[in-house]
Image (spheres, rainbow, N blue to C red):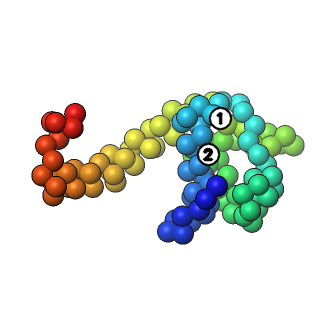
Amino acid sequence: MEFDSNKPIYLQISDNLCERILSGELKPEDRILSVRELGAEIGVNPNTVARSYEKLTDAGIIYTKRGLGYFVAPGARDLVLEAERKAFMENDWPKLLKRAELLDIDLKKLI
């Protein structure tokens, strides 16, 4: 995993897991790497991974089974999809529209 210096690493880790859920690579009830395993694999402090997992747990995207680890929650894909669509509509779409206007791009031709 390559990191962007303009975004906190814990957010990039949680975004990566969400992308893997959206793509179908991770499915409901799949076990994900432990905090220590993922930290070692990507070369970050386990506390950073723990922060990502806490964010995802709070959002209901993953959950923990005591003594067994972290798992993808049932309905996680729907939760991620809803959050990503909302973020796109609030953040990305207005920027795209403004850019298209500045470049005099006819949106009807794009569609």
- Going by the numbered disc 1, the residue's amino acid type is Leu
- Cα distance, mark 2 to mark 1? 8 Å
Q: Is residue 88 left or right of residue 18?
A: left
Against 87, is 27 above or below? above
Indicate left or right for 3 with 88 as reference: right
Tell me the SS state at disc 1: loop
Q: Toward the viewer: 77 or 13?
A: 13
| Crowd around label 1: few <14 · some 14–19 · many ≥20 (10 Å) | some
Residue 67 place in picture, x, y as percent: 87, 43
Residue contact at pointers 2 and 1, CB within 8 angstroms: yes
Where's the C terminus, which quadrant?
top left
| Residue occupied by mark 1 | 26
Q: Position of residue 53 (x, y in %)?
A: 67, 52
Seen at 19% across and 51% down, the residue is: 100
Q: Nearer the viewer, residue 79 or 93?
A: 93
Which residue is rendered at x = 67% and y = 59% of the image?
51
Residue 109 in which image quadrant: top left
Which one is nearer the viewer's eye here, 12 or 41?
41
Q: Give the number of the disc on residue 17.
A: 2
Amino acid of disc 2 = Leu
Q: Could you tell me if residue 104 is visible in this image?
A: yes
What residue is drawn where x is 15% and y is 47%? 105
> Sequence order check: which comes first, mark 2 or mark 1?
2
Q: Position of residue 33 (x, y in %)?
A: 76, 46
